[in-house]
Image (spheres, helix red, strand yellow):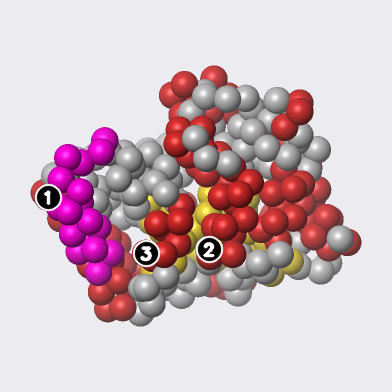
Amino acid sequence: MERLINLGVNVVNISIKEAIALGLGRVEISLGKEKEYKDKLRKFIENVNDAEILKIPYSIHLPVYIEDWYPYDYFSAFFIDEDEKKREISFKLLEHNLQNLKKYSADYYVLHFPGISAKWSNTKKFNDTLKYSLNQLNTIAEKYKVKINLEYFGSNKNFFDYNDWINTIKNYKNLGILLDTGHLYFASLMNNFDFTKALKALASSSDAFHIWTVIGDGVYSQSKSYQKYHHIAPHLEQLKKNGWAFDTKKVVEIIAKENKPVIIEPSIKYKGIDYLIKGINSIKNFLLYR
């Protein structure tokens, strides 16, 4: 079976061997949100070792190693938070992870970056903090000889403009942008910009992609779909006119033109594993025969 080297899946709900059998050419490995931490960490290590043995390209979604001295949700991102202590503990956690992961050979790492923050009253102080934080991230990435792709979110009112992301992050050799279709959709609703226009701009400037979707309007806690199903697996039959966030086929067409890693990042809460596999096959076949 022909393998699509730039199409992959997060392996929280599907094994690496199953991903390969489906014709996928890469995977992304993370802790996920289910189960106890020690069980998730053990499974993560198994997955990384399998990826190394099976010689399939993989990325790692940070963080993985969580210690008692980090008292927050591990996917929180305080790198440009007003609280300096939160910023510094985030850098500490990042370096702790890269130190523990340096024996592995991930293609790149994915990191949540902007966090959730209201508009700072002191714009200069924020801009100085942003510059400092990006310099710190780039320095850490250089130290461990890795590429870190920062996942775009629109929930930080100080740094949501996708053009600012493009123009700022391009200046850092070891940093890149990861465009996430679900978070971009939410950002377009939160900040009143055109989803497709932003998608096209970010696609050409991003180094990798996550793809998932939701049904209907509303963002995060205000989205009934997101609260019930979390990340719904993409499928080419999903159409905006039928209530989906966007026309999945059009989104796939746009990001596929860039020939960069595309990771399907689903839960299986919506119609189970069968729906995920059907979605994977729909995208794989489209890319193979377009």
Which badge, 2 or 1, comes first in the chain's sequence?
Answer: 1
* Most distant residue in the right direction: 289
Q: Position of residue 121 (x, y in %)?
A: 17, 40
Please rate how many residues cluster around mark 2, counting C-alpha atoms within 10 Å: few if below 14, some from 14 to 19, many from 20.
many
Q: Which residues are magenta?
A: 118-135
Instruction: Identify the residue position indicated by label 3 in the image.
Output: 168
Callout 1, which amino acid?
Glu
Asked if the residues shown at circle 1 and circle 3 are in contact, with their CB atoms under 8 angstroms apart, the answer is no
Which badge, 2 or 3, comes first in the chain's sequence?
Answer: 3
Location of the N terminus (image quadrant): bottom right
Callout 3, which amino acid?
Thr
**3D distance between C-alphas at marks 2 and 3:** 12 Å
Q: Does dot 1 land on a helix, a strand or a loop? A: helix
Which numbered marker is on residue 84?
1
Q: Nearer the viewer, residue 96 or 182?
A: 182
Callout 2, which amino acid?
Ser
Q: Position of residue 60 (x, y in %)?
A: 46, 61
Location of the C terminus (image quadrant): bottom right
The answer to which quarter of the image holds residue 103 is: bottom left
Instruction: Identify the residue position indicated by label 2 in the image.
Output: 206
Residue at image position (62%, 67%) is: 260
170 up-or-down from 182: above or below: below
Residue at image position (76%, 28%) is: 241
Q: Nearer the viewer, residue 125 or 97?
A: 125
Residue at image position (76%, 26%) is: 242
**3D distance between C-alphas at marks 2 and 1:** 29 Å
Q: Is residue 226 left or right of residue 127?
A: right
